[in-house]
Image: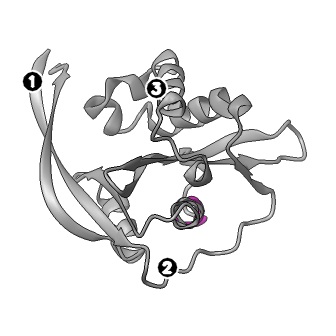
Amino acid sequence: MGLTYFKRFRMELDLTEPLFDAPPLPPGYELVPWTDGLSREHAMAKYQSFHCELDANVFPCLGRRDGCVRLMREIARRSTFVPEATWLLRHHSPTSRPQAVGTVQGLRVEGWGAIQNLGVTQEHRGYGLGTILMAQAAAGFRRVGLAKMHLEVTTANTAAVRLYRKMGFRQARTVFKAAEVSHA
């Protein structure tokens, strides 16, 4: 194990400006607003989205099912939790029961909407689902009276950085996150 520093961008979006266009929800998908009973489904979507990704190195809890369950419970219990900006995405297959395939959570931090863990499972990427989830979160922040939102993204996650820029986020600053990483 060794200490590694991950370079991350803080990206910001002005919610008083017109929002980016999200594609329509593809057939077979369902957006589900937050309720207390959805914590475990959010956690499983989070785990499936991140456990094999770079962010599981930056935030080790994302690489474990129990870590995602604990993280989701902690987020939902915070006084700054914004249910209106927290969404679950399910996929309905004709041959199986509905499955959680995407998640986003929102917090209110110092007058800003703060995105937590936007994730879409690998097999469901490429359909605009991340953009759809982000649009729902942004609309939720607007509904509770917030005029701006931000997120952090690891710079090596170039697909996410590109997506956020396309949505109108601007890079505000660079931060570094220290994490213990196995150097095998």
Task: Identify the image's colour scheme: rainbow, by chain, secondary structure or one colour.
Answer: one colour
The residue that disc 3 covers is 71
Can you say which quadrant of the picture contains the C terminus?
Answer: top left
Q: Which mark is residue 20?
A: 2
Q: Which mark is residue 3?
A: 1
Q: Is residue 44 left or right of residue 98?
A: left
Disc 2 or 1, which lies upstream in sequence? 1
Q: Amino acid at mark 1?
A: Leu
Disc 3 or 2, which lies upstream in sequence? 2
Q: Amino acid at mark 2?
A: Phe
Of discs 2 and 1, which sits in the foreground?
Answer: 2
Q: Position of residue 68 (x, y in %)?
A: 49, 25
The residue at the far bottom in this view is 18
Q: Is residue 184 above or below residue 27?
A: above
How much space separates mark 3 and mark 2, taking CA atoms? 29 Å
At x 51%, y 15%, the residue is 66
Q: Main secondary structure of the magenta part?
A: helix
Q: Is residue 38 above or below residue 106?
A: above
At x 27%, y 62%, the residue is 11
- Residue 166 falls in which quadrant of the image? bottom left
Q: Are marks 2 and 1 in contact (CB under 8 Å)?
A: no
- Residue 98 falls in which quadrant of the image? top right
Of discs 3 and 1, which sits in the foreground?
Answer: 3
How much space separates mark 2 and mark 1, taking CA atoms? 38 Å
Q: Is residue 90 left or right of residue 109?
A: right
Q: Is residue 43 left or right of residue 88?
A: left
Can you say which quadrant of the picture contains the N terminus?
Answer: top left
Q: Are marks 3 and 1 in contact (CB under 8 Å)?
A: no
Q: What's the magenta region?
A: 127-133
